Amino acid sequence: MSEPIPLVDTDEVTVPADIYAAVGQVACSSALLERTVREVLRRMVSGHESSWVIFEGRSLDQMLEDAKAISRDWSAWRDSRPPGAIVIAAFAGAIDEARSINQLRNQLIHGVLSPTDTSLGRATYPRGQAFGEPTYYFARSRPRRDAVVMGFTSRGIQQISKEIDEAALNLLGSLEEAICQRPGDTDYYLD
C-alpha cells in the first residue's frame, strides 16, 4: 500500500467557480454516456424496451465490461449474422475509448480536490499542463495500491467533457454500423 495522501483543510482552499462548473459539465456528459451505454446494451441483448432491467443498478464500468464481453461473441446475437471484422474492431475500439475516458471521469468526480500537488511530485497530467493557468489536483478518494493524483486545468477538464460526449457518439455510431451491416451487404439498413 502506498503512503496516505495528506489532507488539505478545505476552509483554507479557494477553488474558482470555473473548476466546479467544468467538473459539473463532466458529470452531465458522463450521465449521457451512461444512458448511451445502457441503450447500446439494450439493443445488443434484445432490443425489447423492458430489457433495461438486466442492467439496472450496474455501474458504467460494469456495463462497459458487459458490452465488451458481448462484442467478443457476435454470433450469439442478431440472428447469428455478425458484422464484418472492421466493424467489430470499430465497436470494440469505441468501448475501449469509453472505458478509458471513464477512468478520467472517475478521477474528477470521485477525487479529492486540492490546489496543491499532494503526491510529492508523482502527479500525472492526462491533458498536459498549461503555463499561466492554475492546475488543480484530484487524488483518488479510495487509494489503491498506488496513490494516484492527477493534475488538471479548467480547460483540460472541459476537454474531458467533450471527449466523453464524443465517446458516447462513437459508441452509438459503431453499434448502428454493427447491427445494420450483414456480411456481403454493401448497403446498410436499420432493424
Image: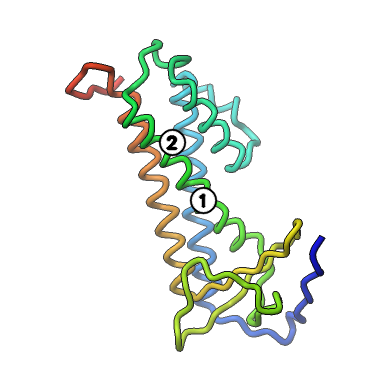
SS state under label 1: helix
Residue 90 is left or right of residue 136, and the answer is left
Position of residue 181 relative to residue 89, above or below, is above
Q: Nearer the viewer, residue 151 or 28?
A: 151
- Residue extending farthest top: 79
* Number of other residues with Cα within 10 Å of mark 1, as a class: few under 14, some 14 to 19, many 20 or more: some
Camera-side residue: 127 or 38? Answer: 127
Q: Residue at x 34, y 24 (%)?
A: 179
Residue in the image at 36% along x and 37% along y: 90
Place of residue 70 in the rendered image (x, y in percent of width and height, measured from the top left): 51, 25
Please identify the quarter of the rendering in which residue 162 is found: bottom left
> Dot 2, how many residues are within 10 Å of its Cα: few (below 14), some (14-19), or many (20+)?
many
Q: Is residue 175 left or right of residue 151?
A: left
Q: Amino acid at mark 1?
A: Ser
| Residue at the disc numbered 2 | 92
Residue marked by disc 1: 100
Q: Secondary structure at mark 2?
A: helix
Question: CA gap, disc 2 to disc 1?
Answer: 12 Å
Q: Which amino acid is tagged 2?
A: Ala
Q: Earlier in the sequence, mark 2 or mark 1?
A: 2
